[in-house]
Amino acid sequence: MTGELKSAGYNRWLVILGTALVQLGVGTFYAWSIFNTPILKMFGKLALDKQGHVAAVQPHLGSVSLIFSIGSLTLALSTIVVGRLVKRFGVRRITVVAGLVFGLSAFIVAQLHSPSQLWLYYIFAGVTLGAADGIAYMATLSNAIKWFPEKNRVYLRNFDRLLWAGVVCL
């Protein structure tokens, strides 16, 4: 990433800006648990006691929280293949496709309104959203480190902070 890219007029600070924006976006996945109660309420199977606390839930909260567990697993597994994908297609293409899959998955999940569609949550919020999150995270983070090898530890710490800032922004 030295002479040839610098002479081509690339600004490596734009890579940092793009990585920061992606990290903020994919960090929102880690706030998934805030959707558990609204999903249960939307299914219309949430019973409250006299104080307004949840008394009974159908489907069970464990069924809904499994969505995040599936997403976390696919996120972790997807990071295994990122290196090969980036070598074959490039960071930009991979990041754009991961962003599109992330957004499309979120859009599809927003259209679900029935308890019988819980399996679609597992697929779109768990598998595809989790995989897109892992691919976008790893592709952009590793790329930023390549552009700034002299500061890789500083950027690693700060990008992880940006990832968690995405949770706070949500």
Image (cartoon, helix red, strand yellow):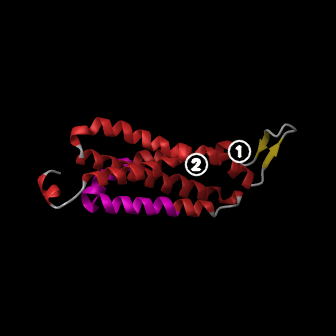
Provide the residue span drawn in magenta: 78-104
Q: Residue at x 26, y 60 (%)?
A: 88
Neighbor class of circle 2 (other Cα within 10 Å; few <14, some 14-19, many 20+) is many
- The reply to whether the C-beta atoms of the residues labelled 2 and 1 are less than 8 Å apart is no
Neighbor class of circle 1 (other Cα within 10 Å; few <14, some 14-19, many 20+) is few
Q: Is residue 81 magenta?
A: yes
Identify the amino acid type marked 2.
Answer: Ile
Q: Position of residue 18 (x, y in %)?
A: 36, 54
SS class, disc 1 = loop
Identify the amino acid type marked 1.
Answer: His
Task: For residue 52, say whether it is visible.
Answer: yes
Q: Is residue 167 magenta?
A: no
Q: Does residue 66 appear to the left or right of 13 in the view shown? A: right
* Extreme residue toward the left, this view: 3
Task: For residue 69, say whether it is visible.
Answer: no
Q: Which residue is mark 1?
A: 60
* Extreme residue toward the right, this view: 50
Q: Residue at x 61, y 44 (%)?
A: 33
Q: Nearer the viewer, residue 155 or 137?
A: 155
Count of numbered badges drawn on the protein? 2
SS class, disc 2 = helix
Q: Position of residue 133 (x, y in %)?
A: 44, 51
Q: Position of residue 110 (x, y in %)?
A: 62, 61
The label number, if any, that marks residue 67 in the structure image: 2
The label number, if any, that marks residue 117 in the structure image: none
Q: Is residue 146 above or below residue 43?
A: above
